[in-house]
Structures are given as structure tokens and as C-alpha cells.
């Protein structure tokens, strides 16, 4: 569920008067999502999404996230555009929470993407990287190695409950990352969470990217590695080479990867798999059932970590 804070019609109607969105016709809470409370609004001028930011989003980061969405939307990336209020401010307060209205994107996220969809995602990711290159704000990646280490130190002592031997396995990964994590690769704004639930399609055509709340500055190829993890594995944890080939070809048709970026893919993909394993493991072990965060299975990403560890050449991802 993703309506943690309820909003009544009177306070919402009053809140909307500060924005050029017309009058409220109807609204409803959106069940999808896990981090924030989201509502679909219908007004006399169209449809919008209202987001109330909950505890896990650092309020100090909101100008970065919202400024980035505005920047990308202005540069032709299909992503939500935050609506500016009559007083020039984007962020308001509703029900005691920071609140923002963004434009509604048409489309559906896919449970079973095809290789055609993977190709579209690759292209959109590269276009996002190019469009973000002149965004003036920066945000360090809070979930880079230091952030992983914090999660690991909180979860390590119970890791073997989830999978026997996991503590030793991940300790060895950390030692490897300290020595071999790629340095000096092209970097800039990355989405950092471009999973299928954050990409909308209308048929075969990609219609929008959402959820920029992990966006940050980091290696472009790390974002590619995150997408390989999120889009190109099947339910049985096998890597789908056709999807990998399509995603990488789509990306490279817009922004070719350098030789160094290609060579680094196995290490980056291992790191990306560890990052999602760790956030999932942390939630799995610390968040009570029925709590605010929907728990996702960390073992799906243990399987991916093992797959990437066994890779001998980046061509195994489908680089052509
Ligand atoms: N601009 C938009 N247009 C249409 N629907 C949207 C838009 N933004 C969000 N949604 C809908 O709201 C849902 C939740 O949004 P979002 O993924 O941003 O939430 P979240 O709480 O940050 O979740 P999580 O981080 O777990 O993915 C989406 O799955 C989608 O259905
Ligand atoms: N995409 C993340 C969750 C929310 O960002 C995951 O699947 O673990």
C-alpha cells in the first residue's frame, strides 16, 4: 500500500488553489509504490499525481529530484513535470507533509517485458544520461559502496538466516570491490532505479519514466548495469541474452559505451546486484510485516550476484 497519509477533500481543495491546475473533480489513493503517498487527481484542467513525501525521502534532496524532473522534461525526456505554484514554489505542505503535484503520464508498467521493450529502455536510459549532462545540481549516490557498507553492517549478523553462507559470500565481495571497483569512467546524472515498475509503455512504445527519488551522480555504466539486472533476468534467474543484447544495443544506439565501460560491466553488474540485495535484505530483516515498506525478496538478487561473479567476458551480456 502506498497511502500512508490520508488527505480530506476540503484540505486538498484548499491546497490546489495555490497551483494552476483548475478545480478538483475527484481524487483517489494509488496502491502501487512503497516509499511515498501518491494520489491520482482529476481536475477541470486534466489529471495529475499528488505526492506526499514520507520519512524515507530526505527533504533536503527534494529540490534536486524535482529540479531534475523539470530539467529532463524540458529537454524532451518523457517524465513527470512538477507543477509550479502561483507563488513560484513547487513544494507545498499538505497534511503536515511536503507535497508536490506532478503531471500525469499515460501508459502501463510491464510485468513481462519483451526484448523489444528492453531495447526501448536502453535508448531511454541513454537519452536520460545525455539530457542530464547539463543539469547544474549534483547529489552524491547515497547507495554507493559506503552506503552499502552501512546496510551490510546492520544486516550482516542475520544474513545467514536468509541464506546460509551469505555473510562470508558478501564479505568477500566487499573485499573485491575495495580493490577492483572501476574508477575514472564517464559519470553524470543517473536514474539509479530504472526497474520495470518505473517505466510506462503504450503498446511497444515507451511512454514515460517515473520515480526519480534515487537519482544521483554516478557512473553511467552503473545505471546500465542496474537495468541489465532489473530487465534481463527471467523468473528462474537465468539471464536472457536476447534481452541483454537488445537493451545494450538500444543504449549504444544513443550513447556508445567506451571500451573501459564495456570491460567494467561485470563488476558494475555485481555491484548493482549487491546494492538491491542489500536494501532488500535490510528491509527483510528490520521492517515488521504489515509495516510501511513492501518487502521484496533479497534472494532474487543473491542469484544475480552469483551469475555476474561467474561472467568471464562482457560479451556474455550481449555486447555486439
Ligand atoms: N507521473 C505519473 N503519471 C502516472 N502515474 C504515476 C506517476 N507517478 C506515479 N504514478 C503512479 O504511482 C505509483 C507510485 O509511484 P512511485 O513509483 O513514484 O512511488 P514510490 O512510492 O516512490 O514507489 P517506489 O519507490 O517503491 O517505486 C506508480 O506505480 C504509478 O502507478
Ligand atoms: N527497485 C527496488 C525497490 C524500490 O526502489 C527493488 O526492486 O528492490
Image (cartoon, rainbow, N blue to C red):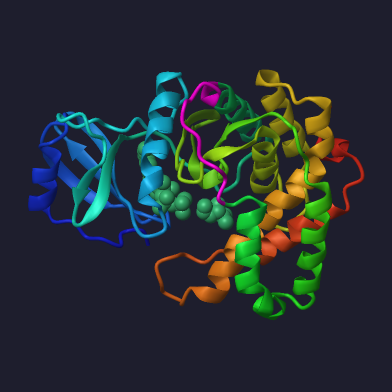
**Foreground pick, 280 / 171:** 171
- The residue positioned 59% from the left and 63% from the top of the image is 280
- The residue positioned 42% from the left and 25% from the top of the image is 71
Q: Position of residue 194 (x, y in %)?
A: 56, 42
- The residue positioned 72% from the left and 51% from the top of the image is 271
Mostly what secondary structure, the magenta segment?
loop
Q: Quadrant of residue 185?
A: top right
Q: In this view, does 3 lie above or below 187?
A: below
Q: Where is residue 249 in the image (x, y as percent from the top left)?
A: 73, 26
**Foreground pick, 242 / 275:** 275
Q: In which quarter of the image is residue 146?
A: bottom right
Q: In which quarter of the image is the C terminus?
A: top right
Left/right of residue 123 with respect to residue 237 in the rendered view: left
- Is 133 inside the magenta-drawn segment? yes
Left/right of residue 20 with respect to residue 284 in the rendered view: left
Q: What stretch is highlighted in magenta?
A: 131-142
- Visible residue check, residue 266: yes
Q: Where is residue 204 in the image (x, y as percent from the top left)?
A: 55, 29
Left/right of residue 171 with respect to residue 73 in the rendered view: right
- Is 198 inside the magenta-drawn segment? no
Q: In which quarter of the image is the N terminus?
A: bottom left
Q: In this view, does 200 lie above or below 310?
A: above
- The residue positioned 23% from the left and 34% from the top of the image is 89
- Visible residue check, residue 308: no
Q: Is residue 20 above or below residue 303?
A: above
Q: Where is residue 99 in the image (x, y as percent from the top left)?
A: 26, 47
**Foreground pick, 42 / 91:** 91
Number of numbered discs on residues: 0
Q: In this view, does 112 lie above or below 55?
A: above
Amino acid at each position: 500500500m502506498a497511502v500512508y497519509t490520508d488527505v480530506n477533500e476540503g484540505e486538498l481543495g484548499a491546497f490546489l488553489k495555490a497551483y494552476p491546475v483548475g478545480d478538483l473533480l475527484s481524487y483517489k489513493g494509488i496502491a502501487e509504490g512503497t516509499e511515498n503517498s501518491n494520489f491520482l487527481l482529476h481536475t477541470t484542467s486534466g489529471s495529475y499525481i499528488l505526492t506526499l513525501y514520507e520519512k524515507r525521502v530526505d527533504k533536503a534532496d527534494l529540490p534536486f529530484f524535482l529540479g531534475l524532473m523539470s530539467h529532463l522534461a524540458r529537454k524532451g525526456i518523457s517524465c513527470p513535470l512538477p507543477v509550479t505554484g502561483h507563488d513560484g514554489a513547487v513544494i507545498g505542505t499538505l497534511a503536515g507533509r511536503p507535497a508536490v503535484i506532478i503531471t500525469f503520464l499515460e501508459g502501463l508498467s510491464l510485468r513481462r517485458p519483451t526484448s523489444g521493450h528492453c531495447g526501448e529502455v536502453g535508448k531511454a536510459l541513454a537519452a536520460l544520461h545525455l539530457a542530464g549532462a547539463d543539469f547544474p545540481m549534483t547529489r552524491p549516490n547515497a547507495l554507493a559502496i559506503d552506503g552499502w557498507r552501512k546496510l551490510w553492517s546492520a544486516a550482516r549478523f542475520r544474513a545467514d538466516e536468509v541464506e546460509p553462507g551469505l555473510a562470508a559470500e558478501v564479505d568477500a565481495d566487499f573485499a573485491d570491490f575495495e580493490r577492483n571497483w572501476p574508477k575514472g569512467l564517464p559519470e553524470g546524472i543517473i536514474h539509479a532505479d530504472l526497474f520495470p515498475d518505473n517505466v510506462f509503455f503504450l503498446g511497444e512504445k515507451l511512454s514515460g519514466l517515473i520515480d526519480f527519488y534515487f537519482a544521483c551522480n554516478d557512473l553511467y555504466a552503473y545505471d546500465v548495469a542496474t537495468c541489465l539486472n532489473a530487465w534481463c533476468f527471467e523468473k528462474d534467474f537465468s539471464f536472457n541474452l536476447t534481452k541483454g543484447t537488445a537493451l545494450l544495443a538500444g543504449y549504444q544506439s544513443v550513447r556508445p559505451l567506451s571500451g573501459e565501460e564495456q570491460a567494467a560491466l561485470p563488476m558494475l553488474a555485481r555491484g548493482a546486484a549487491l546494492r538491491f540485495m542489500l536494501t532488500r535484505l535490510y528491509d527483510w530483516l528490520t521492517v515488521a510485516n504489515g509495516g510501511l515498506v513492501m518487502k521484496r525478496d533479497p534472494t532474487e538478487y543473491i542469484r544475480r550476484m552469483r551469475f555476474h561473479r561467474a561472467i568471464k567476458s562482457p560479451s556474455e551480456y550481449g555486447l555486439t
